[in-house]
Amino acid sequence: MVVNLLGRDFETGNFSFADVHVEAARRVAAAAAAAGVTRLVHLSHLGAAPGAPSRLLRAKAAGEAAVLDAFPGATILRPAPMFGTEDRLLRAWAAMSKVLPFIPLVDGGRTRMALVDVRDVAAAVKAVVEQDALAGQTYTLAGPQEATVRELVELIFHTLREPVRALAVPSALMALAGQPRELLQRLVPFPVPVLPAEMYTPDNVAGMAVDYVMPPGAPGFAELGITPRKAEGMNLDYIRSMRSGGYLSDFAGNEGRDT
């Protein structure tokens, strides 16, 4: 069995979205078929569609088609944005709060996300590779709760025990501001060390026009026999460690409480 987790949410001078999500995915699927592999699981992304506003999401959709063309029995998993230790969403915003005067909210942060715990995605992969009946299907892996980007950013500041510092920025202005960095990123083979390389680029901003929530009627965790964890009340140890006054500090700088 083969599980393809290869992905990249920003382009560099070495690899474009098409290189990573289409051509590499096709090669993995073709190699698996040639080797006589019986089970192939391919991780895509919730929101992948040929007409998606983001080049990343369009490449993800093209990658799914390439995989199924080379390996018709492949199982496609489409996870929502994931959270967990060292994630590149909540932790990235928390890290930015330490170096920026405010967190930009594209179009006010109204994009909705049904964040999914990375452990539940891992459980889904395990379920798929262990059950032959799940081969050749597509499953959307979204968490049981929805929150706007604004609400998630507010959760981060609450976890850090800091006043919320966020500013609504029109998507057109945010895309314009990120264009030079995206152009530079495409020229060099390493992440540009300013902000997280995948965030606030024009393509990332375009992707914020999509709500990353469970599509009506789409097969998901229920069909896999998995009850996904709720994001509300989730353990954010990996963010609490960034509190200026220490892990157990509160707004007043006192220690020993963690309510």
Image (cartoon, rainbow, N blue to C red):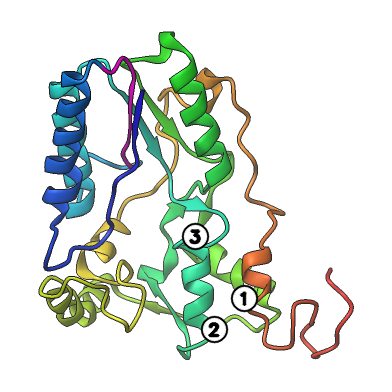
Q: Quadrant of residue 64?
A: top left
Task: Give the amino acid at mark 3.
Answer: Asp
Label 2 with label 1: CB-CB less than 8 Å: yes
Mark 3–mark 2 distance (CA, rounded to whole Å): 21 Å
In the depicted view, which residue is nearer to us: 234 or 194? 194
Which residue corresponds to mark 1? 157
Q: Which residues are magenta?
A: 37-45
Residue 186 in picture, x, y percent from top left? 13, 70
Quick one: 134 or 5, which is closer to the camera?
5
State the residue lying farthest toward the top.
133
Residue at x 46%, y 70% (from the top left corner):
92
- Relative vertical location of residue 245 with respect to residue 142 in this rendering, above or below: below
Residue 74, image x and y in percent? 28, 21
Q: Amino acid at mark 2?
A: Arg
What number is the disc on residue 87?
A: 3
**Residue 51 can be seen, yes or no:** no
Residue identified by numbered label 2: 165
- Front-lying residue, 24 or 209: 24
The residue that appears at 27% across and 55% down in the rendered structure is 8
The outermost residue toward the front is: 35
> Which quarter of the rendered picture does the N terminus lie within?
top left
Magenta segment includes 40: yes
